[in-house]
């Protein structure tokens, strides 16, 4: 059993961070994990993406050309990675910043206004957590409880943001679970 | 000991500290800046010293001085930076100084790009710089193995009094994976005291001279034979490799090292599900090279496939190993592009269908 996902957006959206949180949580559950960032010659505000693999067995290739899931947080990311999703895979679209539909019809597509949801929760920077929640709800790649634990550890130095991020995670999880596909 | 999720670069730094390396001299270059960054944070905690030198040339000569005093010392760089260190590395080998050098390879030639590559294989294993010398070269395929090999590298460097090179690609430097450091690790070699080191002299013993200059040709020839004897012992005792799928029957043998071998292992698993049997040899030591393992594994195969992130460098050692006994095929990406499992699967299917062109040498 393997879950792999490419999470992509622009620099500053916290994409690499939610990838790390996912990998940490997988490791805490005793799974084999890898986290691989893009590290091209990007500048601040440019695109950022990471590939996370969570597996019951040692991770083979940490490079995934045809991921089981893609989380697209902005339009360039959707344009870049939509064609790569494995047929039958999962495509998560942040409809707050992406004003087009998925072009493919062989995927499970979940659209959710991550930024709008985060704003409504009073957590303007929490769109990434909403997206992570949706991914978890849809795939059960790792348990929500484990991810919440990791969020508590990650933000231990900033206790003020822990609960609002967990709320964002839960809100996303509800959306994802409603469309659960088990990819 | 619990597992920690670490970047390869950080794990390499921590492994060095745990191996007793308290001195680091380097100069920044992508994609390995997290190694000096980590060392600049970590070394002061253990009473060590981190120096960001004014250049790679300076850093590598600081390495020479520190190793000459008997300390465990490391530098890290990436391809163009390692080329700048090459002169000093020849001096280090000539003066028999134990150091650990990490090269997180990026795509070249020249300044090239910052993305992963394996294009320094020939430089590392055969032609780093002038003179008859060899580096012991170890190539990890995971963050855990990078950490383990760095710790072994310090023991091997001390044991052979020779520079040891850790050769990784950009993925090894940037990827995060769980890593575990064994407590109470014992050296993998019995290490004699460093009585050759220049540690100050009160007149009670002969002066220690750390030098690679031998103007007397007879003495230099003796020195070269002495060095060769060490390299022969490395070839006898330090060959490292891993194999998969060699116990069963297989039609094709894959030879790949570093993270490329992981990509291949994923492809081989996919092919196994379709009934295509493929074996693999993964060299871990690139010098000494596991010639015998490759030769013996090739016997059962109908063809051999080499996969590399270069225009074809390790393939020369595979040719030496199999000596024309089997058709040889090659799959590569360069420039910072990565080989994907799908490409390996397609190539292996092309080989079995007869539509892949053999590598032919005049």
Image: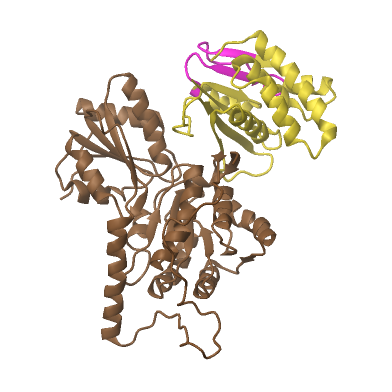
Q: Quadrant of residue B220?
A: bottom left
Rendered location of residue B241, percent (x, y)? 33, 45
Position above or below: B274 against B169:
above
Say whether residue A101 is magenta.
Answer: yes
| Residue A68 locus on image (x, y percent) | 51, 21
Q: Is residue B210 left or right of residue B316?
A: right
Q: Which residues are drawn in magenta?
A: A84-110
Q: Is residue A112 visible?
A: yes
Residue B171 seen in the figure: no
Residue depicted at x 34% and y 64%: B134
Where is residue B236? Give x, y as percent: 27, 57
Specify the colour of chain B.
brown
Decide: is A154 above or below B131: above
- Residue A84 position (above or below residue B306): above
Residue B235, position as x, y percentages in the image:
28, 58
Q: Quadrant of the N terminus of chain B?
A: top right
Question: Does residue B47 belong to the magenta stretch?
Answer: no
Nearer to me, A146 or B101: A146
Which residue shows up at 71% across the image and 13% down it? A174
Figure colour of chain A: yellow
The one nearer the camera, A115 or B205, is B205
């Amino acid at each position: 059993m393997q879950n792999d996902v490419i999470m992509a957006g622009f620099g500053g959206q916290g994409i690499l961070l939610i990838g790390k949180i996912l990998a940490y949580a997988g490791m805490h559950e005793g799974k084999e994990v890898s986290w691989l960032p893009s590290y091209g010659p990007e500048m601040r505000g440019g695109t950022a993406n990471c590939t996370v693999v969570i597996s019951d067995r040692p991770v083979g290739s940490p490079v995934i050309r045809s991921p089981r899931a893609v989380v697209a947080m902005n339009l360039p990311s959707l344009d870049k990675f939509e064609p790569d999703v494995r047929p039958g895979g999962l495509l998560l679209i942040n409809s707050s910043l992406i004003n087009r539909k998925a072009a493919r019809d062989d995927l499970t597509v979940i659209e959710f206004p991550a930024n709008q949801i985060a704003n409504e929760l009073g957590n303007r920077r929490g769109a990434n957590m909403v997206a992570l929640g949706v991914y978890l709800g849809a795939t059960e790649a790792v348990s929500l409880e484990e991810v919440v634990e990791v969020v508590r550890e990650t933000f231990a130095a900033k206790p003020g943001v822990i609960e609002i991020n967990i709320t964002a995670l839960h809100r996303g999880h509800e959306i994802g679970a409603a469309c659960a596909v088990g990819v | 000991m619990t597992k920690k999720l670490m970047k390869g670069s950080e794990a390499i730094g921590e492994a060095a500290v745990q191996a007793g390396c308290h001195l680091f001299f380097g100069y920044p270059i992508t994609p390995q800046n997290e190694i000096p960054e980590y060392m600049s944070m970590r070394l002061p905690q253990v009473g060590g010293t981190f120096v960001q030198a004014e250049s790679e040339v300076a850093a590598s000569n600081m390495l020479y001085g520190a190793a000459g005093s008997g300390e465990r010392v490391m530098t890290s760089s990436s391809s163009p930076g390692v080329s700048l260190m090459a002169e000093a590395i020849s001096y280090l080998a000539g003066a028999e100084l134990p150091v650990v050098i990490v090269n997180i390879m990026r795509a070249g030639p020249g300044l090239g790009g910052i993305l992963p590559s394996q294009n320094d294989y020939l430089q590392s294993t055969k032609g780093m710089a002038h003179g008859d010398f060899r580096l012991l070269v170890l190539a990890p395929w995971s963050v855990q193995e990078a950490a383990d090999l760095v710790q072994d590298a310090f023991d091997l460097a001390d044991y052979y009094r020779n520079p040891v090179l850790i050769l990784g690609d950009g993925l090894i430097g940037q990827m995060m994976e769980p890593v575990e450091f064994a407590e109470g690790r014992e050296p993998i070699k019995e290490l004699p005291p460093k009585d050759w080191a220049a540690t100050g002299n009160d007149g009670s013993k002969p002066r220690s001279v750390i030098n690679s200059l031998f103007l007397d040709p007879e003495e230099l020839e003796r020195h070269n034979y002495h060095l060769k004897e060490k390299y022969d012992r490395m070839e006898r005792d330090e060959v490292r490799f891993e194999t998969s799928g060699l116990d069963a029957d297989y039609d094709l043998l894959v030879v790949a090292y570093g993270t490329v071998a992981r990509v291949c292992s994923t492809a081989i698993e996919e092919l196994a599900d379709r009934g295509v049997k493929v074996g693999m040899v993964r060299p871990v030591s690139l010098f000494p090279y596991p010639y015998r393992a490759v030769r013996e594994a090739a016997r059962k195969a109908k063809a051999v496939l080499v996969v590399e992130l270069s225009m074809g460098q390790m393939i020369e050692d595979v040719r030496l190993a199999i000596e024309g006994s089997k058709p040889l095929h090659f799959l590569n990406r360069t420039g910072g592009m990565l080989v994907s499992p799908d490409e390996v699967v397609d190539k292996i299917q092309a080989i079995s269908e007869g539509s892949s062109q053999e590598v032919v040498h005049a």
